[in-house]
Image (spheres, rainbow, N blue to C red):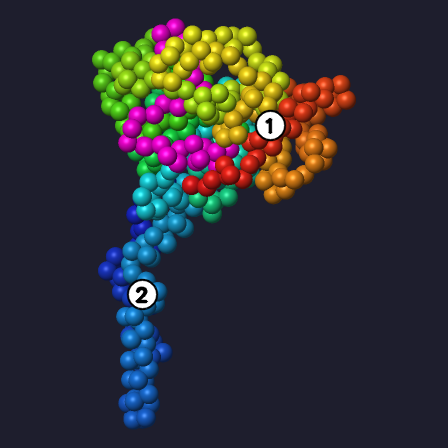
C-alpha cells in the first residue's frame, strides 16, 4: 500500500469461521432470547417455567425499546477494524491509525499535512514528537515520511486517532519535491473527506484553534489558496514555510489539471530547481490554469495570520531583505494594496488570529505551546511573571533554536523588544479566538 492513511477496513473472520457463523455468534452473544442462562429451563417445574417466561417477556420488551441492548454485525465489524488499524507500528510499516475521515459523519473541517522540512533533517523525529505532544492531535496532523526508522516519532500513541502517517513510495526520493507533493495531494484528497487541507512542514508551529476560527465562514465549495503571499515574477505564491490552505474544490480541480499531461503550467519536466520548489509550480498551476491566485489573508487588511519566521524575529522585524522585497508590488488584485508591501513589526507584526510561525525547532514548539496554554488559563498574569516564564521555557543554546530563529533579547538592555514580545504573546492567546472544530 502506498498510503498508510486510514481507510475503510474489511474485517476478516477469525479461525476459519464464515461470515454467517460470525453473525450467528454475534447474535448468540447479545440476544436476550439466545442467552444460555435463560433458554435452559426446567420443564418439570411449572413454577420455574412461568417465571422464566415472564423474565423473557420483560427482557424482550426492553430489547426492542432500547437499541443499546443490541449490537449488530456492522458494529462488531467496526470494532474489529479499530483493533486492526491501530496495530503497533514496526520498523518497516507506519501506524495505520483509525481515521475520523471514515468514521465521522460528514466531512472534517480541515486536516494538516506535515511535509518534511529540508532544514536540519536529523532533528525531524524530535520535531514530530514535539508536534505530537502539542498542536498535532487537535490539528488532525498527517506526518509525511520517507524513512520510518529515521523519522517516525516515538511518542505516537497507537490508540489515538491523530496524528496519522503517510509513507511516500520508495520511487519518490527526498529530493523529488514536486512528485512528492503531487502524490500527497492525490492521497489526501482520496483518503480524507475534509473541507480544507492545510500544508505545512515540521518546522512550522501551528495554532489549530485560530485556523479553525479563520475557516469557520469559508466555503469549501469555492476555490481557495490561502497563506502568506509573496511576489514571484509572474504570479503571487504562498510561502511554504508559513503554510497554505487549499479548499476541497481546489484540491479536486488541481488533481484534474495534473491528470492533463499537456498542461505545462502544472507539469514540469527536466527542471531540477523547480522540482525542488514544488510550491512555485503549484502556485503557477493554480494561478494560470485554475484562475485561483493567492489572496491577502491579513486580519483587517493589516495584521498577518501566517508567518514565515519565528515569533522573536517576526516581532523584532529581523527578517531577510529578500523576504521583505517579495511583499512589494503585488498589485491591487485579490485584495492586495500598497500597504501589503510594508511589513510591520512590534505588536503590529501579528494578528490576534495568528495561525503559524516558521523555523521553529522542537524546544520552541513546546515553549510556545506551554506559554499560550498558561495565558489562556490565566490571562491576568503580570508582565513580570510572563517574562520570567518565557525566559525559563525558551531554548537557551543556539543549536536548540530553529535554523533561522533568534534568541530572546536581553531583558535589561532591550526593554522595547520585550514589551512587544509580551504584547504579542498576549495577543495570540485570547480565548475569543480559541475555537475548536
Percent position of residue 14, x then y: 33, 55
Which of pointers 1 and 2 indicates the residue nearer the eye?
Answer: 1
Residue at left 55%, top 21%? 349
Camera-nearest residue between 21 and 145: 145
Percent coordinates x, y for residue 222 in the rendering:
29, 28
- Residue pictured at 62% horizontal, 18% vertical: 316
- Judge the density around disc 1: few (<14), some (14-19), many (≥20) Cα neighbours within 10 Å: many
Residue drawn at x 65%, y 28% as measured from the top left: 422
* Horizontal and vertical percent position of residue 357: 53, 25
Given residues 265 and 374, the one toward you in this image is: 374
Q: Is residue 69 above or below residue 332?
A: below
Q: Which residue is mark 1?
A: 424
Total labels: the figure holds 2
- The dot on residue 67 is 2
Q: Position of residue 344 (x, y in %)?
A: 55, 17
Query: What span is colored magenta in the figure?
Result: 206-235
**Furthest residue toward top:** 233
Amino acid at each position: 500500500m502506498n498510503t498508510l492513511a486510514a481507510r475503510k477496513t474489511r474485517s476478516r473472520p477469525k479461525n476459519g469461521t464464515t461470515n454467517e457463523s460470525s453473525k450467528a455468534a454475534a447474535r448468540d452473544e447479545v440476544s436476550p432470547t439466545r442467552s444460555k442462562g435463560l433458554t435452559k429451563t426446567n420443564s418439570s417445574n411449572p413454577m420455574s417455567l412461568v417465571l422464566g417466561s415472564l423474565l423473557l417477556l420483560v427482557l424482550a420488551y426492553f430489547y426492542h425499546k432500547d437499541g443499546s441492548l443490541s449490537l449488530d454485525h456492522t458494529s462488531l465489524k467496526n470494532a474489529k477494524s479499530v483493533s486492526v488499524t491501530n496495530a503497533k507500528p514496526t520498523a518497516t510499516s507506519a501506524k495505520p491509525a483509525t481515521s475520523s475521515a471514515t468514521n465521522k459523519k460528514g466531512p472534517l473541517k480541515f486536516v494538516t499535512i506535515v511535509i518534511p522540512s529540508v532544514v536540519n533533517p536529523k532533528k525531524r523525529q524530535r520535531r514530530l514528537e514535539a508536534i505530537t505532544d502539542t498542536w498535532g492531535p487537535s490539528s488532525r496532523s498527517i506526518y509525511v515520511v520517507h524513512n520510518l526508522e529515521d523519522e517516525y516519532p516515538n511518542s505516537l500513541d497507537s490508540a489515538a486517532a491523530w496524528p496519522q502517517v503517510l509513507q511516500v513510495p520508495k520511487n519518490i526520493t527526498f529530493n523529488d519535491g514536486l512528485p512528492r507533493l503531487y502524490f500527497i495531494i492525490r492521497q489526501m484528497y482520496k483518503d480524507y473527506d475534509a473541507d480544507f487541507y492545510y500544508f505545512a512542514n515540521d518546522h512550522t508551529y501551528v495554532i489549530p484553534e485560530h485556523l479553525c476560527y479563520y475557516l469557520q465562514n469559508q466555503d469549501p465549495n469555492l476555490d481557495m489558496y490561502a497563506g502568506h503571499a509573496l511576489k514571484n515574477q509572474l504570479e503571487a505564491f504562498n510561502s511554504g514555510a508559513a503554510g497554505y490552505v487549499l479548499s476541497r474544490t481546489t484540491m479536486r480541480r488541481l488533481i484534474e489539471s495534473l491528470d492533463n499531461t499537456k498542461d505545462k503550467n502544472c507539469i514540469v519536466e527536466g527542471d531540477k530547481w523547480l522540482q525542488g520548489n514544488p510550491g512555485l509550480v503549484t502556485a503557477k498551476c493554480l494561478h494560470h490554469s485554475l484562475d485561483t491566485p493567492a489572496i491577502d489573508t491579513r486580519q483587517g487588511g493589516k495584521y498577518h495570520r501566517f508567518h514565515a519566521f519565528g515569533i522573536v524575529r517576526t516581532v523584532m522585524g529581523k527578517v531577510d531583505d529578500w523576504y521583505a522585497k517579495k511583499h512589494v508590488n503585488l498589485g491591487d488584485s485579490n485584495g492586495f494594496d500598497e500597504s501589503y508591501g510594508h511589513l510591520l513589526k512590534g505588536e503590529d507584526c501579528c494578528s490576534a488570529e495568528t495561525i503559524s510561525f516558521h523555523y521553529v525547532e522542537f524546544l520552541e514548539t513546546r515553549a510556545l505551546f506551554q506559554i499560550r496554554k498558561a495565558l489562556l488559563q490565566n490571562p491576568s498574569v503580570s508582565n513580570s511573571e510572563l517574562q520570567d516564564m518565557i525566559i525559563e521555557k525558551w531554548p537557551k543554546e543556539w543549536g536548540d533554536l530553529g535554523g533561522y530563529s533568534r534568541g530572546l533579547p536581553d531583558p535589561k538592555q532591550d526593554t522595547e523588544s520585550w514589551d512587544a514580545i509580551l504584547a504579542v504573546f498576549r495577543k495570540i492567546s485570547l480565548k475569543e479566538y480559541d475555537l475548536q472544530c
